[in-house]
Image (cartoon, helix red, strand yellow):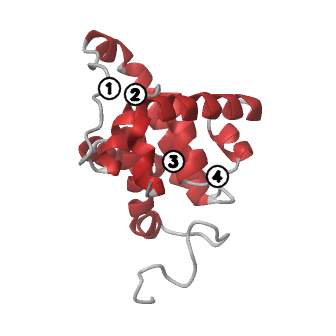
Amino acid sequence: MPENGQGSGSPEGSSAPVSFEAFARTSQRRLYRTAYLLCGDPETARDLTQTTLAKLFQHWRRASAADHIGAYAQTVLTRTYLAERRRRMRDLLAHSRPGPRPASEQADLRVTLMSALAELPPRARAMVVLRYWEDQSVESVAELLNCSASTVKSQCSRSLAKLRTQLGEAHLYTTGS
């Protein structure tokens, strides 16, 4: 086994049977990163990653038979996130967050962006993260979220407009102006 712990081939795209342990070891970091971008909270992201891995383990025979195990795992992660958000919608409405805080001039752009992302509805946030952070095509995001490509395009457009409005002057930090 090579030093990177990935065996002779990548478990995410290979057709050879791969053990769950090997897949989990090589994919956990990527799944966590996506979960963190979706949730915006490290603890919730860890929980979401573990829930995803548990679901994959439970159905490993079906998951390992998929053409692209990594894409299958991404689908499980995204759908688990959306299902948990829908389940907790009542709690979120009962304990609604205050309006977005204005970004101070010393605010870290990452914190500002995470705060703005947190204001998006869960499905719109998932679309923005998958489309622009994970750099997935409109068609693959539509397939992951069980919707049409036009829905992804319109939701992303509205979400980006909302982010631009919320971020206000924060975009100046990225352009260096």
- Give coordinates of residue 140: x percent, y percent: 69, 46
User: Which amino acid lies under the numbered mark 1 shown in the image of this protein?
Assistant: Pro
- Give coordinates of residue 48: x percent, y percent: 36, 43
The reply to whether discs 2 and 1 touch (Cβ–Cβ < 8 Å) is yes
Helix, strand or loop under label 2: loop
Q: Is residue 52 visible?
A: no
Q: If you read the primary sequence from the N terminus, does the residue marked by circle 2 or circle 3 appear first?
A: 3
The residue wearing badge 3 is: 59
* In the displayed structure image, the side of residue 7 where residue 140 appears, left or right: right
* Picture quadrant where residue 100 is located: top left
The residues bearing labels 4 and 2 have C-alpha atoms spaced at a distance of: 22 Å
Nearest to the eye among marks 4 and 2: give it. 2
Label 4, residues with CA under 10 Å away: few <14, some 14-19, many ≥20: some
The residue wearing badge 1 is: 100
Q: Is residue 133 visible?
A: yes
Comparing 117 with 108, the one in front is 108
Nearest to the eye among marks 1 and 4: give it. 1
Q: If you read the primary sequence from the N terminus, does the residue marked by circle 4 or circle 2 appear first?
A: 2
Q: If you read the primary sequence from the N terminus, does the residue marked by circle 1 or circle 3 appear first?
A: 3
The residue wearing badge 2 is: 119
Label 1, residues with CA under 10 Å away: few <14, some 14-19, many ≥20: few
- Give coordinates of residue 33: x percent, y percent: 40, 55
